[in-house]
Amino acid sequence: MKAIVLDKTCKAEDLKVTEVPMPKIEEDKVIVKVKGFGINRSEVILRDYEADEPYIKLPRIPGIECVGKIIDPSNSPFKKGDTVCCLMGGMGRSFDGSYAEYALIPTKNTFKIKEDILEKLSLEELIAIPETYFTAFGSLFECLDLKKDDVLLIRGGTSAAGLSAIQLAKSIGCAIAATSRNEDGINRLKNLGVDYAIIDNGEISPEILKIFPEGVEKILDFIGASSLKDSMNALKFRGIICVAGLLGGEDYIKDFDPITGVPNGRYLTGFYSNYPSQRTIDEMFEFIIDHNIKPTISKVFNSLENMSDAHKLMESNEAKGKIVFKLENDE
């Protein structure tokens, strides 16, 4: 089969399609014919520098998510021909992922997509959903316990996950403030109906406090460690901040002291997307359908040969939505 195999860290232009053996079925795993997958920032990080870490065993096929059809269900509850989405749990890092025509995936990371969902979404839309919307959905409703009357600040609002979070939050009627690093992004946020679009120069709390003197109830931060202290300063008493990304390029805060680093009466949580469940995946898709949410797609590629271009687009920060690969037609 054709696949993208990472045997060392490299530049985007070094990603090439190679021929590798088809995966062989194993107990508690399924073989999936990959119909498509989204490109994620973590895959760029893996290619750029993380593959040098000792916990990554090379060679490795990247890709942390996919949509596909079961061709060998092994001892799983799935049936041959079931349409499924697969994501996380070490996919593309601990074991080979989705940058391939076929993938061997643990049953626990594989989730059936109901027939009524398949009837209401195009294949491109379906491919654009799993990881990005799972992160946004879990962050907003599991971690932040978002309610209609909350004011929500989304830091990193023009990222794929940020755009998804805006859609989800708007669908329940929240007031939304969101950030971007440039005017083009600000215009996009305004066009999406964001109530307060704010340039992120690294310190936005003074601007937020001008609008909301007591701070905001909920913050979803996709920038991560580099912005956490400033985001905390924009949080209302009894408010919650959820960190769900590392767009700021820092993995952690050096010498972080939770006693002094988290202001009194403010709550810090994080969304760790490594443990999806069938129930959550069902709830997510049903929410998307019930609220008529359509994924924002930046570009659709139709061949693994285009992987270099996809990674370059991700690195450029010019993608206006999810970058997806559609390897099969809807039929």
Image (spheres, rainbow, N blue to C red):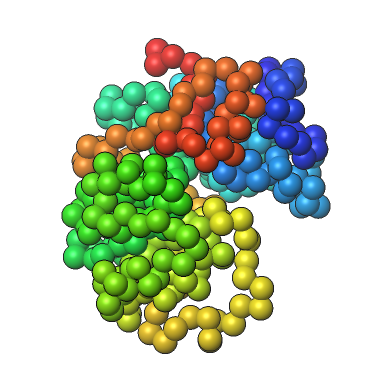
Q: In screen coordinates, is 278 left or right of 50?
A: left
Q: What residue is shown at x 33% (from left), y 42% (from top)? A: 188
In this view, 82 is above or below 189: above
Closest to the observer, 299 or 318: 318
Q: What residue is shown at x 44% (from left), y 42% (from top)? A: 160
Residue 28 visible from this viewpoint: no
Q: Residue furthest front?
A: 183
In this view, 308 is above or below 283: above
In this view, 252 is above or below 170: below
Q: How many marks?
A: 0
Q: Quarter holding the N terminus?
A: top right
Q: What residue is shown at x 38% (from left), y 84% (from top)? A: 265
Closest to the observer, 272 or 299: 299
Image coordinates of residue 30 in percent, x first then y, are 58, 32
Image coordinates of residue 152 in percent, x first then y, are 30, 62
In this view, 150 is above or below 232: above
Q: What residue is shown at x 77% (from left), y 40% (from top)? A: 9
Q: For residue 307, what is the image quadrant?
A: top right
Image coordinates of residue 177 in percent, x first then y, are 30, 59
Residue 318 visible from this viewpoint: yes
Q: In screen coordinates, is 270 left or right of 21?
A: left
Image coordinates of residue 161 in percent, x first then y, are 43, 47
Q: For residue 234, what is the image quadrant?
A: bottom left
Q: In screen coordinates, is 41 left or right of 22?
A: left
Q: Quarter holding the C terminus?
A: top left
